[in-house]
Amino acid sequence: MGLGLIFPGQGSQQVGMGAEFSANHGLAAQLFDEANDALGFDLKRICLAGPEDELTLTYHAQPAILTVSLIAFRLMAERADISPLNVAGHSMGEYTALVAVGAMDFADAVRTVHQRGKFMQEATPVGVGAMAAILGMEAEELQRLCEEEAHGQVVAPANFNAPGQIVISGDAGAVKRVLARGKGKLLPVSAPFHSALMVPAAERMAEVLEAVNFSDASAPLMANASNEFLTQAGDFPASLVAQITAPVRWDTGIQAMIKAGAKRFIEAGHGKILAGMNRRIDKSVETLGVQDEASLKATLETISR
């Protein structure tokens, strides 16, 4: 059965995530130690004990999610033959996917997403930008609405998560004007991710990624921004820069993975956000999860049948 591996992005963090794995598996403790060494601060403490407002800081949340997701993946891979047909990660999760398929070193990825989080936070002052989830609206209709309500500001679709579930991003005033004409809610984020307001962050990340060593991937990566399958080391830096300002095309990316032969997905990392999106994209495809001991055991049992 063709297997697609998927990894969550920012927003899936929760204080205590990975605690069971850390308590029961030396591999988890080892990865947390490697992350701490790479970053120069105690990410493990922030992840397991919080406080929540410290974990949710963009530059803490991103390396924390990556680390817990890689723990989940590697614990699964230790116990089963995991040979994915293709992989994907939602926004920051694209870095996790690259580590999982051997295209990026774990320590490099942890350091890089920490910098990514800082650059994205610093690109706009807090309160200038906003993001909102818009429900029940088609992409073309929402795009027109964003254009009508921009009034010289930035506002555009940022995450095409699933049919009828699109996130917009941009200047706070413009986002609120669009929201007033639709159905949805403002998201508790500190910056307008995946919008033109992130250009300064993209420019700074381009410099950082020039110094990172990439390898060819052992399985194709479905890129968020281009919706192309990438496998060559030289293609990854430009893709990672592009996704900072470009919308995340999760819906069509998952559809392309299914068309390529993925019959089942495994979401490795805390929460079930991507599984919920996948159900809206294609109800016929199963999405399993690995986020704690019980789900690890259940997923291993399912894939062994």
Image: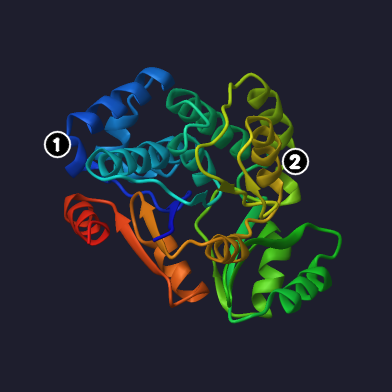
Which residue bears the numbered disc 1?
Answer: 23
The disc, 2 or 1, on the residue closer to the chain's N-terminal end is: 1
Q: Residues within 10 Å of mark 2 (few under 14, many from 20)?
A: many
Q: Of 91 and 222, which appears nearest the observer?
A: 222
- Distance from Cα at disc 2 to Cα at disc 1: 41 Å
What label sits on residue 199 in the rendered view? Answer: 2
**Splitting the image into 4 quarters, where does residue 263 fall?**
bottom left
Where's residue 45, x and y in %?
Answer: 27, 31
Q: Is residue 283 left or right of residue 297?
A: right
Residue at the image position 22 percent from the left and 42 percent from the top: 79
Q: Is residue 22 left or right of residue 228?
A: left
Quarter of the rendering occupied by the N terminus: bottom left
Give the structural element (helix, strand or loop) at label 2: helix
Quarter of the rendering occupied by the C terminus: bottom left
Q: Amino acid at mark 1?
A: Ala
Residue at the image position 38 percent from the left and 49 percent from the top: 13
Where's residue 23, x and y in %?
Answer: 14, 36
Q: Amino acid at mark 2?
A: Val
Q: Are marks 2 and 1 in contact (CB under 8 Å)?
A: no
Where's residue 169, x and y in %?
Answer: 66, 58
